[in-house]
Image (spheres, rainbow, N blue to C red):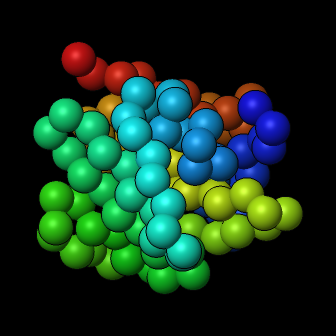
Amino acid sequence: MPSAPVKQDGRSFAPADALAEGLEVTLTKAGKIITLTGPDTSVQLTVGEPMIKINNQEQKIDAAPFTAGGVDFLPIRRVAEAFGAEVSWDAEKQQVSIGLVK
């Protein structure tokens, strides 16, 4: 992975392309708009905006996507759970685990 996940304001973020690959979904970008598309789910986020659109239903989130060093970072838990993945946090290891449910 060219950029590692980061922790910001108590939330974990991953590079958009790495998160899409891990979730096995398609990633598209148009300016500040990032869209991840799976077989039954579409997730859209806008860099800098604390909103997520899941299958065209908009919801407020507490961790806005951001860009650093030319890489777009997305809030791991919110995006992964939108695709039905199980997300857990190991405080001792400071590690996020994502379990895909198929």
Looking at this view, is 61 or 91 the one in front? Answer: 61
Please tell me which residue is depicted at 70% across the width and 68% down the height of the picture.
67
Q: Quadrant of the C terminus?
A: top left
Q: How many marks?
A: 0
Residue 19: name its quadrant: top right
Q: Does the image show residue 92?
A: no
Looking at this view, is 71 or 95 the one in front? Answer: 71
Position in image of residue 6 (x %, y %): 75, 52
Query: Which residue lies most toward the bottom here?
Result: 49
Q: Does the image show residue 72?
A: yes
Query: Which residue lies most toward the top here?
Result: 102
Please tell me which residue is depicted at 39% across the width and 57% down the height of the picture.
35
Residue 1: name its quadrant: top right
Query: Which residue lies most toward the front here?
Result: 30
Q: Is residue 67 above or below residue 92?
A: below
Please tell me which residue is depicted at 65% across the width and 70% down the height of the picture.
66
Position in image of residue 17 (x %, y %): 59, 43
Residue 44 shown left or right of residue 21 in the figure: left
Q: Is residue 2 above or below residue 24?
A: below
Position in image of residue 45 (x %, y %): 42, 68
Residue 32: name its quadrant: bottom right
Q: Is residue 1 above or below residue 4?
A: above
Please tell me which residue is depicted at 15% across the width and 39% down the height of the picture.
40
Q: Is residue 85 above or below residue 61?
A: above
Position in image of residue 20 (x %, y %): 48, 39
Residue 78 shown left or right of residue 58 in the figure: right
